[in-house]
Every structure is written in C-alpha cells, then in structure tokens.
Amino acid sequence: MKKVLLLAISLLIPPPAHGGPASAAQDRPQITHVLFVTMDGMRWQEVFGGMASDLLTKKEGGISEPAPTEKRFGGAAAEERRAKLMPFFWTTVAAKGQVFGDATRGSTARVTNGLRFSYPGYNEMLAGFADPRIDSNDRHWNPNVTVLEWLNGRPGFKGKVAAFASWELLPWIVNTERSHLPANGDGPPVDDPVNERERTINDYSQDLPPYWGETRADAPTGFGALEYLKRHQPRVLYVMLGETDEWAHGRRYDLYLDSAWRNDRFIRRLWDTAQTLPGYAGHTALVLATDHGRGSTGENWTSHGRDVREAERIWIAVMGPGVAPLGVRSAADVTQSQIAATIAMLLGEDYNAAQPKAAQPLPLK
C-alpha cells in the first residue's frame, strides 16, 4: 500500500523545469575540465573561407612570391581551403562541436565593446560584459573579476585555473595582483623548470628573435602551456596566442596564414595531450575564439579598432561532451560577452548568478 501511495504522489509532482544555464549544464555529461584558446585578431573570413586569393599580392598582402602560399593553402572551394588552413578545427572541432560566426550561413558573432581591439575584447570575453573604463591596451589592472578568477574561488577549482599568453598584458587582464592566478605572459615559458626538457624549452625561447616588443612567438607559449598541463593538470587552462594579429599588422598575409596553421596544430596537440591525462578523456570541453576581427577587403584587412566597423565580427567554437555536433550554426546571433558564462556553464557553474552583468551562455544544443 505504501509503495502504491508513493508512486501516486510521484506521478502528481511535475518534473523539474529546464532551460536555465545551471539546469542546461546538469543535463550534459559531466565536464570537469575546460581548455580555452584564443587566436588574436584571427578573421572570420579565413576561419570559414580559408585563404583569400585577392590578398596574395605585394600591395595588399606583402607577398612577393604567391605561388608557395597558393600551393599550400589554395583550393577551388571554401571548404577545401579552410580545411588546409585549419585541419584540426574542421575535421574535429567543427565535426564534433558547434561553430558560430559564418556570415554566409546567416550567423553573426560580434564584440559589444565598440572599440574592437585587444584589451577591451579580452575583458569582454573573460568578464562577460564590455566595460567603458577599459579603453586602451595600457597596463592597468582589470577592475573586473574574470570568470577565471571567479572559478578559482569555487569549490574544487582552487589552484586549478591557469593562463598562458604570448602577450605581456595577460597579468593585467586577469589582474594577478588580486586574483593570484598563475599567468605566464612574458619571460621564460616555464616558470620553474624541473627537468632537462623544460630547461631546453626556456633556452629555445630565449634564442628566438624578438620581433615584437610586447608579444613573444606562439611556440614558446604553447610549449609552456603543454608542460603546465602535463605537470599541474589544471581544471581550466586558458592560452592566448598572438602571432596572427602581429603578422596581420605587419601586412604579411603569408605569415598570418602560416601562424593560423601552426596555432591549429598547437590546439590539436593540446587536445591530444589532455586525452592522455587521468580524468580528462570524455570530460573535457574545448572553447576557441578571438578578441576582435579585422577589416574585410583589400589593404584594410590589416586594421581593426574604433574606426573599423567590420572588425566587430568574430567567430566562436565549442566542442565537448554533451555539445551536439551541429557544426557551423545557421541563423544564430551571438556575442563575445557570452563566452565567460559558457565556460562556467560547461563546468556546471552559474556565472550569471554571481555576475548579473554578464551575458547568458551561448545557445548550445
């Protein structure tokens, strides 16, 4: 009789409502780790369309001999060109996850800060909202608590959140003075080498020429992040790559494409390395994005900022357990400010409850 009564009561009680960020995360297989990688100033045009033939010139692209670049990245269709440029992105991330920002599919991804350059973009994606106080790339401590800092204060995440960058401003963006996050943005890529491999990585980094004052090459950043991943096994690892922006500003379209290809190779290596670590395989999400777009045509492709309206257009990609393999999303309008809450949601955390100004998570299905 008691069992019958309990069954009757259970049938009368409605199931819990779904749809909010927390419940959406609970509906997914458990994700315990997130790898977040950004490619500075990487245009959506190349992500979705691959190499642009009209930029293989001396005037627009700074290329004296276009044939090698054409042979390496060219193709009759956009699908062929983009697969050559970013093979891991298109064979794995897009095939198993979701990608936003392809204008040819009626999908827009954009920044909301109106400034369209780096520090405002990194604040928007990490804090979840644009802040008019951040209006330059100067070294000012970020007044906003980023999702990285917030997660580091959550149960189970303390000491398990870290960031690496090719840009020296990383410590200011994540405010290490307040957050105390491990944030390697310049100097040796391995802060405390304990073996010959790590010491060799630091020596190799010092032997590279300093092409840019505030940005080191992406290779040392990537190697440092990989060593950190293997030794410390963080639950959240953010890697900010920078060469795509530097070569674009230098009007070297061939080297811009090459750096994108090498970034894609690093992302593959990062993902594959994570799959070999205890607890990562089947429980790790990958989030990819950029801080801003660039000009769309001709000589203007190198530019971004307040006066380059089209530089507000970006791209975002997410792959992980429970993220439906929908590929390139159509008719989906998203913003950079949704990335912070998305990272938290993937981990089963509700960033919006702590930071009401933050945008809601991406509409992942």
Image (cartoon, rainbow, N blue to C red):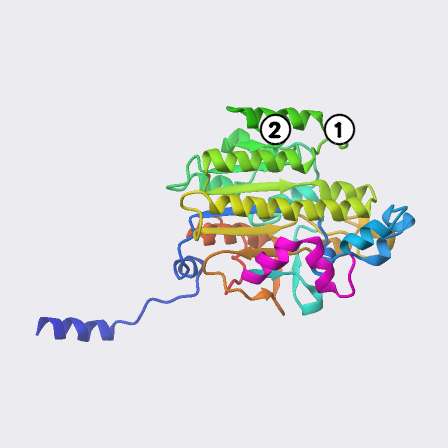
Please rate how many residues cluster around mark 2, counting C-alpha atoms within 10 Å: few if below 14, some from 14 to 19, many from 20: many
Count of marks, rendered view: 2
- The residue carrying mark 2 is 201
211 vs 259: above or below = above
- Residue located at (66% from left, 35% from top): 167
Please rate how many residues cluster around mark 1, counting C-alpha atoms within 10 Å: few if below 14, some from 14 to 19, many from 20: few
- Residue located at (60% from left, 47% from top): 267
Residue 164 falls within the magenta-colored stretch = no
Which quarter of the rendering shows the N terminus? bottom left
Residue 197 seen from this side: yes
Give whichever of 315, 33 is nearer the camera: 33
Residue 141 seen from this side: no
Where is residue 295 drawn, in percent x and y? 79, 53
Q: Quadrant of residue 97?
A: bottom right
Amino acid at the residue labelled 1: Pro
Q: Which mark is residue 209?
A: 1
Q: Secondary structure at mark 2?
A: helix
Answer with left or right where residue 71 lies relative to residue 201: right
- Residue located at (72% from left, 44% from top): 259
- Which of pointers 2 and 1 indicates the residue nearer the eye? 2
147 vs 203: above or below = below
Give whichever of 67, 100 is nearer the camera: 67
The magenta span reads 74-96
Answer with left or right where residue 356 lies relative to residue 112: left
Q: Quadrant of residue 235?
A: top left
Answer with left or right where residue 342 lies relative to residue 293: left
Residue 90 falls within the magenta-colored stretch = yes
Amino acid at the residue labelled 2: Ile
